[in-house]
Image (cartoon, coloured by chain):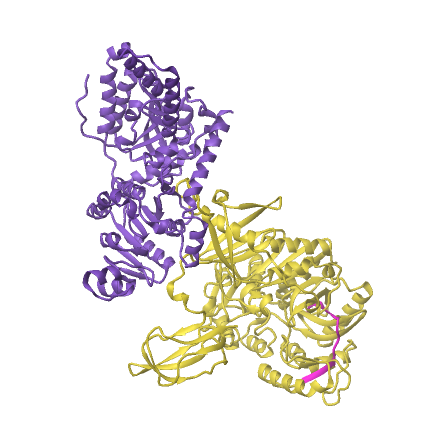
C-alpha cells in the first residue's frame, strides 16, 4: 500500500520538531507544529506551516495529550503524525488513536511498540530469538552481587538501583518498586547481574514493510550522567569487525523477530567481546544524527518514506568516517546537575559542525521540559579529528544567560582516556572534571569593556590630572566576589585583547543587564556586576527576614536549627485583622529566631535569620 | 639635556608635588581615618562621580611654598555626576581635622567662582573642624563670602548640594544651612551653631551632640537634613540621586567624538624649548591640540609674532591667540584686538597660549604708539565676554601677561605648564634694572658704587625672582587653576570648554574706547 504524506503533524517540540520540519521542507511536505503556552514563541512554531496550541504548560496537559494531538492533526488537515522522541513516541495507544483517525503513523506498528514496552517481556522474546541476554535473577533468590534492579516499564533511570551487598537488597527492592509504581504505574521490577566498566552500544535499525532490514552501524553512548547519555558517537572505538558482525546479526534478528517496520534502536551492554541485549527503542533516537553523518542518510526521510510504503534498497550504504554528538544541557555539572531556566540571551555555535537546536537568541528555557538546548555533532575522517572539531566549536560557542554543561563536554572531548577510546558507563564517576578557571582575566576584560561603553565623545576614559587611585570593578563569580584594578586606557570597544604572560588573548564581552558574559579561547565565564551602591536595605544580614508590617506574631512555624525550603512558612503575623504568612526567601537553616508567639513587632524588625546552604 | 628630558624632569617634579597633596595628613591620619570606617576626600569624590568619567582637579598645589600643607586640606574639581558636570568641593579631614586656613578659603572661593561663572551645580562634601584658629584673622572676615556664594549660586538658579560627613559646626553649620539640598549621615554628621560646652557656658543648659545636631535630629525634628544616610557610601548614593533629579540642562553641547590631532601629544615634549630664550612655533603646539590638526590662521602675514586663528577642540569651536616670538609689537596688538572682537561677534570662546616676554620697548616703538596699541589689546581682553581659557606654555612677563589674559583678566580657567615662568620681567633683567637704578642713585649722591655689593644683590634678587616666577609658586598662590602635564593640554581644554558650555556663551556688545 502506498500513501503520500502531504501534511505532517509533529507531536513534539524543541530541536526534534525543528529537525523533522527541516526534512519536510526539503521534501515539500507541509508541517503542523503543536505548542504549549510557554512554547508560544518557540522556533519550531514559527518554522512550521501551521501551529496548534495545546493549552497549559505541564507535559501532562499538553504534549502528552493524545486526544488533543489527534484533534489538532485532523483540524489542521494533517494526514500523518510523527511523534519525535520522548513524550508519546513509544505509546502504543497514541499510535492506535492516530491510525484510528485515518492518519498515517510515522513509526512501527502499535503491536511492536507494545511488545518492546515491557522490558521483562521484551527480554524473554529476544532470548527466544537467539539474541544474547543477561540471565534474569529472581528477586526472591538472588545471591550473586552486585546486581541491578530495573523497572520493567521503566526508562530514564527511574526505578533503577545498584545493589552491592546482600543486606541492602531488601530495602533497595522495596524502594525500586515504590518508585516504579509511582513513575510508571507498574511496580514490576527485575534483576540482572550488574556489568561494571561496560559500554552502552546500540545498533540503528531501519526496516521497511517488505522484509528488508538494515543495520545502520552502531553507536556508542557510554558517557552518561544519571543514566542520561551526553556524548554519543559512531562507530564505537571498542567494536571490532567481528563484534560488529555479531551485533548487527543480533539486532537484525531482534527486529525481524517482531516484524519491526521503521526506524528503531536495539541497545546492548558491551564488555570486552561480549554483549547483552538491553532494550529496543521503537522510535527515532536523540543521537540519530551521528548515524546520518557516517552513513550519509536522512533517517527522518526514511521514516516518512517507509510510512508511505517505500522499499529500502537491498544493500545498506557503507559507513565513512566518524561522527560524535554532544548534548548541550542548561544544567550545572558542578552543582549536582541542577537544571537552569531563564532567558538564553545569545546562542551561537560556529564552525563546521551540525547543530540541532531547539533554541535561538532570546529563547526562554522553562522549567517544564527537558533542559537540553541543542545537540552539536561533528564529522571527520577520524575519531580524533571529530573530537577536536567538536571541542573547538563548543569552546567558540556563545552561550549567554544560562549555565550549561559546555565546559564538561569540552573536557570530555579533550580527555586522554576518551581520546584513547577508553569509555564506559562509569566514565564520569571515574574521572574528575571539576574545572578551575581563574576568573581574573575575564573580570579584567569585563571591566575594560564596561569602561569602553562609558566614553564621553572621545575624551580619555577615567582621565585624572592628579590620580589618587586606580579604577576598580567588582563582579560576582559564582558566589564569590572578585575585584579587579584596571587601566581605562586599555579599554576598547569590541574585543578586549589582554596580554597574558606574553600571550595576546582576545576576550569577547557581552552584557545583559547586570550579567556579563566573557568568552575567550581560554574558556567562558559568567559574571554579575556588583552594584556600586548597594541598596541600604540589602545591608541586613543575609537571610534575615523582617516584618513587612506592624502586627502580632500569631504562630511560629519553625524552630531554631530547622532546615527550610525557599517559600516555607516561617511564622504568621496578624495585622489589621488579617493573617500574613512570612515565608523563607531562600532554602537554608534557621539560625536565629528572634520572636515568639503573641509578640508585637514593628515594620522592619528582624524576625528570623535563614542561613543559605 | 634636550628639550624632552628637561620637560620630563619638570613633570616628574610636578608629580612629586602632587603626591604631597595626595598624601593628605600623612599615613598615620589616613590610617586612623580608614579605621573609623571613613573614606578619604578623594575616595569620596571618586565614588561620587560617574565611573570612568574624567575629573579635572583644581588648584592641587594650593598653599605650595607656604607654611600650610600642599593642597590646602580641601579637594576641588569638576566632575560628572549622573552625567551632570558639577563643581565638587571636599574637605580633607586627615589634614589638621580639615580645618580651613587662608589657602583653603582661597581655593574654595575659587571653586565657587567657577561654579557661578560657568553655571555648574556645586556639590560640597563637608567634614571640617572649622577655622584654623591661629590664622583666624585672615579667614574670619573674608570667609563670610563662602556662605554668601552658596546662596548667590542658589539665587542664580545653580543648585547647591551638601553632604555632611562629620562636623559642620559654628560657621560651618551655614554650609548646609545655605544649601538647596542637605544630606546627613546617621551617627556621623554633627551640625550645630554651638556644641555642648558652648551651650553650657551660654545658657547653662546640659546637652549632647546628638540632640544638638545629629543627623536623625535634623532629619526628623529640625528639618535641616533632607536625607538621612545610613553611612558614607549611602550619603554619596543619595547625593548622586539628588543630582540625577535636578533636571539639569546643559546649555551647550557635550564633547563630540571628534577627529584626533594628526600628531601625538607626546611630541610636545620635543617642541618646547628648554631654554626660554629660544622661541618655538606655537603652530606646532596647536597642531597637537586641535581636532584633526586643522587650524585656519587669521592674518598670517601681519603681526606674525602673534598667531591667531580658528579651530575646534573635541568639537568645540575656539579662537586661538598664541605668542610666536615672545615680543608683542603694535601690529600684533592691533591684530589681537581685531581677532578678539571677531570672536565676540561670533560667540566663540578664546584660548590664549602664553609665551610672551611683554610689549616691545624702545624709542622707535614708543613713538610708534606701542602704549596705545598695547592698551587696545588689553581693553579688548578686558571687555571681551566670551569665555577665555589661558595656558601659560612658557614665559609670561610684564604687560604681556595682561594682554594675553593673565589671572587678573579673569579667564574662566588658567592652567600652567611646569616649565612656565611669570613675573613683571625676567630675573636677570629685574636685577639689572635694580643695579642700574642703584648705580644712578650712587652717582647722583656722588658716592662710590660698591661693585661687590652689587654682584651679591643681583645674585640674591635673581634667585628670589626666579623662585617666585616658577609654576608651583604661582600655583601655590592660586594664580592659576593648576599646573598640568603639557601632553594633557588638549584634554584639559576640552574639559574646560565642556564646563563653560554648561552656561550660555555670548560675546560682548561693546568695548571701552579704543585709542586709535
- Outermost residue toward the bottom in this view: A140
Image-based side of A211 in relation to B260, left or right: right
- Magenta region: which residues? A189-208
**Quadrant location of residue B344?**
top left
Image-based side of A270 in relation to A490, left or right: right
Quadrant of the snapshot with the C terminus of chain B:
top left
Viewer can see residue A69: yes
- Seen in the picture, residue A546 relative to A507 is either above or below; the reply is below
Comparing B169 with A8, the one in front is B169
Comparing A481 with A518, the one in front is A481
Q: Colour of chain B?
A: purple
Comparing B134 with B363, the one in front is B134
**Quadrant location of residue A502?**
top right
Majority SS type along the magenta span? strand
Q: Residue B18: horizontal and vertical position, in percent? A: 42, 40
Q: Which chain is yellow?
A: A
**In the image, is residue B89 part of the stretch drawn in magenta?**
no
Image-based side of A267 in relation to B23, left or right: right
- Outermost residue toward the right in this view: A242
Q: Residue A490: horizontal and vertical position, in percent? A: 50, 43
Comparing A300 with B2, the one in front is B2
The residue at the point 37 percent across, 61 percent down is B231
Q: Residue A281: horizontal and vertical position, in percent? A: 66, 73
The residue at the point 41 percent across, 49 percent down is B51
**Quadrant location of residue A411?**
bottom right
Image-based side of A570 in relation to A3, left or right: left
Amino acid at each position: 500500500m502506498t500513501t503520500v504524506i502531504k501534511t505532517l503533524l509533529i507531536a513534539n517540540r524543541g530541536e526534534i520538531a525543528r529537525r523533522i520540519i527541516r526534512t519536510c521542507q526539503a521534501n515539500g511536505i507541509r508541517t503542523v507544529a503543536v505548542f504549549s503556552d510557554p512554547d508560544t514563541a518557540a522556533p519550531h512554531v514559527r518554522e512550521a506551516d501551521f501551529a496548534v496550541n495545546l493549552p497549559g504548560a505541564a507535559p501532562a496537559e499538553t504534549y502528552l495529550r493524545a486526544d488533543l494531538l489527534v484533534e489538532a492533526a485532523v483540524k489542521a488537515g494533517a494526514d500523518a503524525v510523527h511523534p519525535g522522541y520522548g513524550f508519546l513516541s513509544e505509546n502504543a495507544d497514541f499510535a492506535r488513536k492516530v491510525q484510528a483517525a485515518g492518519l498515517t503513523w510515522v513509526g512501527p506498528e502499535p503491536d511492536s511498540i507494545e511488545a518492546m514496552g515491557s522490558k521483562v517481556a521484551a527480554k524473554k522474546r529476544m532470548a527466544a530469538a537467539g539474541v544474547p541476554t543477561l540471565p534474569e535473577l529472581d528477586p526472591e533468590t538472588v545471591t550473586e552481587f552486585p546486581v541491578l534492579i530495573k523497572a520493567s516499564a521503566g526508562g530514564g533511570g527511574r526505578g533503577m538501583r545498584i545493589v552491592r551487598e546482600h543486606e541492602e537488597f531488601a530495602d533497595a527492592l522495596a524502594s525500586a518498586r515504590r518508585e516504579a509504581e509511582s513513575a510508571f504505574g507498574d511496580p514490576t521490577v527485575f534483576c540482572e547481574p550488574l556489568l561494571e566498566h561496560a559500554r552502552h552500544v546500540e545498533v540503528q535499525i531501519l526496516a521497511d514493510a517488505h522484509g528488508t532490514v538494515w543495520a545502520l552501524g552502531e553507536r556508542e553512548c557510554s558517557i552518561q550522567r544519571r543514566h542520561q547519555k551526553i556524548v554519543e558517537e559512531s562507530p564505537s572505538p571498542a567494536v571490532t569487525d567481528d563484534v560488529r558482525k555479531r551485533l548487527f546479526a543480533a539486532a537484525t534478528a531482534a527486529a525481524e523477530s517482531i516484524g519491526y517496520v521503521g526506524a528503531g534502536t536495539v541497545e546492548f551492554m558491551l564488555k570486552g567481546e561480549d554483549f547483552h541485549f538491553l532494550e529496543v527503542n521503537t522510535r527515532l533516537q536523540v543521537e540519530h544524527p551521528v548515524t546520518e553523518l557516517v552513513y550519509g542518510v536522512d533517517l527522518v526521510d526514511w521514516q516518512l518514506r517507509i510510512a508511505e510504503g517505500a522499499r529500502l534498497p537491498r544493500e545498506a550504504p557503507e559507513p565513512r568516517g566518524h561522527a560524535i554528538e554532544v548534548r548541550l544541557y542548561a544544567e550545572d555539572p558542578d552543582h549536582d546537575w541542577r537544571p537552569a531556566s531563564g532567558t538564553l540571551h545569545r546562542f551561537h555555535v560556529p564552525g563546521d559542525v551540525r547543530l540541532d537546536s531547539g533554541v535561538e537568541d532570546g529563547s526562554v528555557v522553562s522549567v517544564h521540559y527537558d533542559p537540553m538546548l541543542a545537540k552539536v555533532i561533528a564529522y571527520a575522517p577520524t575519531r580524533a579529528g571529530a573530537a577536536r572539531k567538536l571541542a573547538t566549536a563548543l569552546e567558540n560557542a556563545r552561550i549567554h544567560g544560562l549555565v550549561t554543561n559546555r565546559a564538561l563536554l569540552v573536557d570530555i572531548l579533550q580527555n586522554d582516556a576518551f581520546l584513547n577510546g577508553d569509555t564506559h558507563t562509569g566514565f564520569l564517576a571515574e574521572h574528575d572534571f571539576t574545572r578551575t578557571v581563574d576568573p581574573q582575566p575575564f573580570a579584567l576584560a569585563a571591566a575594560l569593556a564596561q569602561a569602553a561603553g562609558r566614553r564621553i565623545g572621545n575624551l580619555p576614559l577615567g582621565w585624572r590630572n592628579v590620580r589618587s587611585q586606580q579604577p576598580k570593578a567588582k563582579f560576582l563569580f559564582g558566589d564569590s566576589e572578585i575585584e579587579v584594578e584596571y587601566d581605562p586606557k586599555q579599554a576598547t570597544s569590541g574585543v578586549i585583547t589582554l596580554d597574558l604572560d606574553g600571550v595576546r588573548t582576545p576576550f569577547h564581552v557581552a552584557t545583559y543587564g547586570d550579567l556579563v558574559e566573557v568568552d575567550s579561547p581560554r574558556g567562558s565565564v559568567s559574571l554579575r556586576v556588583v552594584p556600586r551602591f548597594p541598596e541600604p536595605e540589602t545591608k541586613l544580614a543575609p537571610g534575615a527576614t523582617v516584618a513587612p508590617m506592624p502586627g502580632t506574631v500569631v504562630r511560629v512555624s519553625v524552630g531554631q536549627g530547622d532546615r527550610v525550603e525557599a517559600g516555607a512558612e516561617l511564622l504568621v503575623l496578624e495585622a489589621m485583622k488579617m493573617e500574613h504568612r512570612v515565608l523563607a526567601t531562600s532554602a537554608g537553616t534557621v539560625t536565629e529566631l528572634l520572636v515568639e508567639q503573641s509578640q508585637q513587632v514593628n515594620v522592619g524588625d528582624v524576625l528570623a535569620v535563614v542561613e543559605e546552604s | 639635556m634636550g628639550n624632552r628630558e628637561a620637560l620630563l624632569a619638570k613633570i616628574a617634579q610636578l608629580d612629586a608635588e602632587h603626591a604631597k597633596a595626595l598624601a593628605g595628613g600623612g599615613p598615620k591620619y589616613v590610617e586612623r581615618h580608614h579605621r573609623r570606617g571613613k573614606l578619604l576626600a578623594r575616595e569620596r569624590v571618586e565614588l561620587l562621580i560617574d565611573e570612568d568619567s574624567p575629573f579635572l582637579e583644581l588648584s592641587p598645589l594650593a598653599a605650595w611654598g607656604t607654611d600650610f600643607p600642599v593642597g590646602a586640606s580641601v579637594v576641588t574639581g569638576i566632575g560628572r555626576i549622573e552625567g551632570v558636570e558639577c563643581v565638587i568641593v571636599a574637605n580633607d579631614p586627615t589634614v589638621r581635622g580639615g580645618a580651613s586656613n587662608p589657602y583653603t578659603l582661597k581655593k574654595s572661593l575659587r571653586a565657587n567662582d567657577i561654579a557661578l561663572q560657568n553655571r555648574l551645580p556645586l556639590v560640597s562634601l563637608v567634614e571640617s573642624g572649622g577655622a584654623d584658629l591661629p590664622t583666624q584673622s585672615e579667614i574670619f572676615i573674608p570667609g563670610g563670602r563662602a556662605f554668601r556664594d552658596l546662596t548667590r549660586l542658589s539665587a542664580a538658579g545653580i543648585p547647591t548640594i551638601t553632604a555632611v560627613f562629620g562636623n559642620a559646626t559654628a560657621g560651618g553649620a551655614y554650609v548646609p544651612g545655605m544649601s538647596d539640598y542637605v544630606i546627613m549621615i546617621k551617627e556621623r554628621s554633627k551640625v550645630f551653631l554651638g556644641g555642648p560646652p558652648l551651650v553650657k557656658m551660654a545658657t547653662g543648659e546640659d546637652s549632647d551632640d546628638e540632640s544638638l545636631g545629629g543627623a536623625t535630629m535634623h532629619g526628623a525634628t529640625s528639618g535641616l537634613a533632607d536625607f538621612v544616610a545610613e553611612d558614607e557610601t549611602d550619603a554619596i548614593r543619595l547625593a548622586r540621586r539628588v543630582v540625577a533629579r535636578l533636571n539639569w540642562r546643559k546649555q551647550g553641547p557635550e564633547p563630540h567624538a571628534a577627529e584626533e590631532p594628526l600628531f601625538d601629544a607626546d611630541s610636545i615634549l620635543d617642541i618646547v624649548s628648554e631654554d626660554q630664550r629660544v622661541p618655538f612655533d606655537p603652530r606646532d603646539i596647536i597642531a597637537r591640540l586641535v581636532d584633526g590638526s586643522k587650524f585656519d590662521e587669521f592674518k598670517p602675514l601681519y603681526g606674525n609674532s602673534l598667531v591667531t586663528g580658528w579651530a575646534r577642540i573635541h568639537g568645540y569651536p575656539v579662537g586661538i591667540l598664541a605668542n610666536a616670538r615672545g615680543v608683542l609689537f603694535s601690529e600684533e596688538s592691533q591684530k589681537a584686538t581685531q581677532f578678539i572682537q571677531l570672536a565676540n561677534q561670533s560667540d566663540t570662546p578664546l584660548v590664549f597660549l602664553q609665551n610672551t616676554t611683554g610689549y616691545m620697548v624702545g624709542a622707535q616703538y614708543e613713538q610708534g604708539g606701542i602704549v596705545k596699541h598695547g592698551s587696545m589689546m588689553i581693553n579688548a581682553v578686558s571687555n571681551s565676554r566670551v569665555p577665555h581659557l589661558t595656558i601659560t606654555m612658557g614665559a609670561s612677563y610684564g604687560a604681556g601677561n595682561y594682554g594675553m589674559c593673565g589671572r587678573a583678566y579673569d579667564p574662566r580657567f588658567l592652567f600652567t605648564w611646569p616649565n612656565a615662568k611669570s613675573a613683571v620681567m625676567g630675573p636677570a633683567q629685574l636685577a639689572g634694572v635694580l643695579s642700574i637704578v642703584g648705580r644712578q642713585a650712587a652717582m647722583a649722591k656722588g658716592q662710590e658704587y660698591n661693585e661687590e655689593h652689587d654682584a651679591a644683590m643681583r645674585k640674591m634678587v635673581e634667585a628670589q625672582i626666579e623662585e617666585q616666577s616658577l609654576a608651583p609658586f604661582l600655583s601655590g598662590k592660586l594664580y592659576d587653576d593648576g599646573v598640568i602635564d603639557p601632553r594633557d593640554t588638549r584634554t584639559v581644554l576640552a574639559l574646560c570648554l565642556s564646563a563653560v558650555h554648561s552656561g550660555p556663551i555670548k560675546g560682548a556688545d561693546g568695548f571701552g574706547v579704543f585709542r586709535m
